[in-house]
Image (spheres, rainbow, N blue to C red):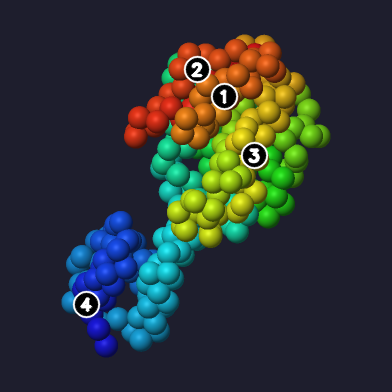
Amino acid sequence: MKTRNELLSQSVERLRMAKLDTPELDARVLVKYALKLSDAELIGGSDLNVSPDCASGLENMICRRVRGEPVARIIGRKEFWGLSFELGLDTLVPRPETETLIEAALAAFGRGTPRKVLDLGTGTGCLLLGLLSEYPEASGLGVDIAPKAVEVAAANGRRLGFDGRAEFRVSDWDEGVEGQFDLILSNPPYILREDIEKLAPEVRLHDPIKALDGGPDGLSAYRALAAAAARRLAPQGLLIAELGAGQEADVAGVMAKAGLKVDGPARPDLAGIPRALVVRR
């Protein structure tokens, strides 16, 4: 039998040889998950032997990572806005740049509270539930065209304690949705169809294509989103939409055609890319 430290060292070396970007971090996450360890247990018990069954489970995970499967897909979860979200085959992996939308909402509302929130294309529910974690008096609805994604989002909501405040349902944009909302959030599909084949394998081979494909010009989903926002935003309500790199001007034009007003330049993510576009009715 091998010790925890030996398995960790071997895992790091294998991921490094596969030329992955973060071999040390990936190996630590996978070792902790496979052996069901905390950080303290991994460090404090580094010389303890690992059972053959656990070692075999880790070997399977390392092989999957070497083949390019994202760590979040292997362990089935991803942290977003300090919350842990379970994933599904029909959901995107939540990404750090999407947190920019919640930052933009906090900045836009200041000390106010968006009482009713709509998340269009909810996926895991990360945007809606992350937002609700900041506003205890708010409630919201998350919709997605993929039934399996809605199941995942609803399960995340229950597990994270948002029963009674967050509802999830299957819908094509705002079809069947009633009423108006103080805030609409959306991370729509925005990749140009012809560019999907150029995406990194971790995205192209493991994220659902429907959640990526923005049509021939990358703007198809924004047109539907703008129309839905024009119908569903309350007076003085806000839409905050995620942007792809270089899309700010084009998406602002789509919003203007729908009678919506862009509220200043888009908020940049940590890489400096304009990421969260704030739009008013």
- Mark 4 or mark 3, earlier in chain: 4
The span from disc 1 to disc 2 (Cα, nearest Å) is 25 Å
Residue in the picture at 47% in, 37% down: 98
Left-right relation of 74 to 213 = left
Residue in the picture at 45% in, 44% down: 95
**Tag 3: amino acid:** Pro
**Tag 2: amino acid:** Phe
- Mark 4 or mark 1, earlier in chain: 4
Q: Residues within 10 Å of mark 3 (few under 14, many from 20)?
A: few
Where residue 216 is drawn, which disc sits there?
A: 3
The span from disc 4 to disc 3 (Cα, nearest Å) is 50 Å
**Tag 1: amino acid:** Asp
The span from disc 3 to disc 2 (Cα, nearest Å) is 35 Å
Residue 193 vs residue 98, the one in the foreground: 193
Task: Determine contact: label 3, label 2, CB under 8 Å.
Answer: no
Left-right relation of 281 to 80 = right
Residue in the picture at 29% in, 57% down: 22
**Tag 4: amino acid:** Glu
- Mark 3 or mark 2, earlier in chain: 2
Where residue 250 is drawn, which disc sits there?
A: 1
Q: Position of residue 150 (x, y in %)?
A: 67, 49
Where residue 6 is drawn, which disc sits there?
A: 4
- Circle 4: element type: helix
The span from disc 1 to disc 3 (Cα, nearest Å) is 14 Å
- Mark 1 or mark 3, earlier in chain: 3
Task: Determine contact: label 4, label 1, CB under 8 Å.
Answer: no
Quadrant in which the N terminus appears: bottom left
Q: Is residue 49 above or below residue 31?
A: below
